[in-house]
Image: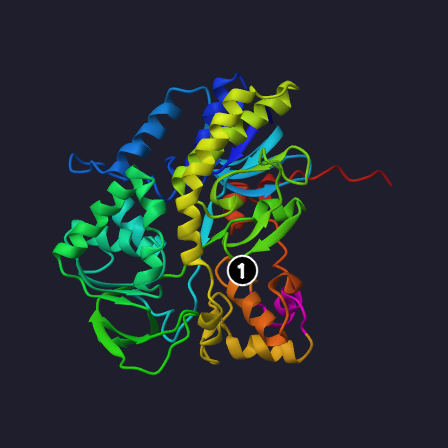
Amino acid sequence: MNHYDLIVLGAGPAGVSAALMAAAKGLRVALFDENSAAGGQVYRAPIMPDAKMDGAEFRAGETLRDELSRSNVRLFLGHTVWAVTGDYRVDALGPDGSMSCTTTVLLVASGTTERVVPFEGWTLPGVIGLAAATILLKSQRTLPGNTTLVAGCGPLLVAVAGNTLKAGGQVKGIVDIASRSEWCSTAAALLARPAIFKQSLSYGLPILRARVPIYSRHTLVKVTAQGDQLLAELAPCDASARPIAGPTKQILVDCVAVGHGLTPSTDITRLLHAKHYYSRAAGGWIAQTDENGQTSRERLFVAGDSAGIRGAAAAIEQGKRVGLACVALIRGATAAASEAESLTKAWQHAARFGQKMAAMMALREGHVESIPQNTVVCRCEDVTRAEIEQACEAGATDVNQLKAWTRCGMGPCQGRTCGDIAAELLANKQGVSRESVGIFSPRTPLRPLTISDMTGDYDYADIPIPKAAPL
């Protein structure tokens, strides 16, 4: 079992930046990620790069991966971390089987999970998340469908629509919960970030040229199968995303890509019993940290969107800052004040735009209230809104009671997909705050594993049989 000064979980922009900073300062660093290449969602590596790939995000991702390849960071890519213990032992499953290592300091940079507020037909084949569409476009170089409807809220709407058009697909419409005035309110923050503004133009101009219909202040209410295609129905909504009376629109497409924001991934920090609090504006539950990114648990740090939604640009700067703090802790010294201050300012500057985007992606109360009673909320266990509210009426007061009574959150995703919505429904039904209903307790294994993956070629014949005890 190897021991490291610092183990970083997550090879997105925050994790890579932290690992590079710590390694450059002389620490022995290991970096884990379940993907086969570093970069995270924003800087996702394509499986088969080609000469046509020359966008800003692709170049930034290639730069990060190149810096990693030239560093002393020990890479464990393609490794699924399934357990982290209180003494900071990390258990992972990789291409060569199970492995374990320990660390003095642990940094969690596990990113986010996409939120989809359920609607009638959201579990149909062909209805996918905006994040899934992004993976298809960036990594697989594959269109979500020949014709696609993009729906939900936040910057991923524009990114998915723009990339779909660039890849040769058709976008039949963009269904946006936000109003035009909400987008206008982000203009100042966007103009303060020239690189992000330029990137936004690269997505927006193809949308304008293709004259894609944009349905502002509308929400997706229903999707039905029509042969090999999907018929999507959208309706006007109010500021809380609650559908209101007005003309509806039906659009026939091959694929519906939908997403309603992001929630920080806190499985590991919750498993290690760090203190957390709920922030709707930051995406949900996040770990309490000091200015260095250290949680309430000693030697446990967080960085990037898993510490609150701020975007990739902010994640890079925060990763550097937290990586520097880890070095200072291990070396028993204070980080250079000038370097720490410079990184903190860069992080705060980058985070301003990210905070604006996070606010647009925040869960809206009317959106959850409009979920139909018989609509599945937990798709792993087929638990509907009606069953969740029936459990509340029977006495369930927090999400873990709800989980025990309905199996909501017990499936392969362990509540990562349904947890945010189930908790909101429970809180609304009781008329209490989100904090009071809690969050699902994390369990090991953190990711679904098969017994054969864990045992490999081991079988009954390999079991050592002790000699019989003497009579």
Please tell me which residue is depicted at 44% across the width and 59% down the height of the picture: 115
Determine the image quadrant of residue 114: bottom left
Q: Is residue 252 left or right of residue 351?
A: left
* Vertical arrangement, residue 7 with respect to residue 257, above or below: above
Tell me if residue 270 is in the magenta stretch.
no
* Vertical arrangement, residue 344 with respect to residue 288, above or below: above
Please tell me which residue is depicted at 75% across the width and 37% down the height of the picture: 467
Which residue of the protein is positioned furthest toward the top in this rendering?
26
Please tell me which residue is depicted at 51% across the width and 45% down the height of the picture: 306
Which residue of the protein is positioned furthest toward the left in this rendering?
209
Please state the horizontal and vertical placement of residue 240, each as a whole percent of the image.
Answer: 44, 70
* Vertical arrangement, residue 49 with respect to residue 229, above or below: above
Q: In this figure, which residue is indicated by the disc labeled 1?
A: 415
Please state the horizontal and vertical placement of residue 82, each as a whole percent of the image.
Answer: 55, 44
Please state the horizontal and vertical placement of residue 223, each as a whole percent of the image.
Answer: 31, 74
Which residue of the protein is positioned furthest toward the right in this rendering?
471
Determine the image quadrant of residue 463: top right
Closest to the observer, 159 or 267: 159
Please tell me which residue is depicted at 62% across the width and 37% down the height of the picture: 290
Local crowd size for mark 1, using a 10 Å CA cut-off: few (<14), some (14–19), many (≥20): many
Q: Is residue 250 left or right of residue 104?
A: left
Magenta segment, principal secondary structure? helix
Q: Secondary structure at mark 1?
A: loop
Please state the horizontal and vertical placement of residue 304, each as a whole percent of the image.
Answer: 48, 40
Tell me if residue 400 is in the magenta stretch.
yes
Total numbered labels? 1
Q: Would you say residue 302 is visible in this rendering?
A: yes
Q: Would you say residue 76 is visible in this rendering?
A: no
Closest to the observer, 443 or 135: 135
| Three-letter amino acid code at the position of disc 1 | Gly
Q: Is residue 300 left or right of residue 237?
A: right
Residue range corresponding to the magenta coloring: 396-408
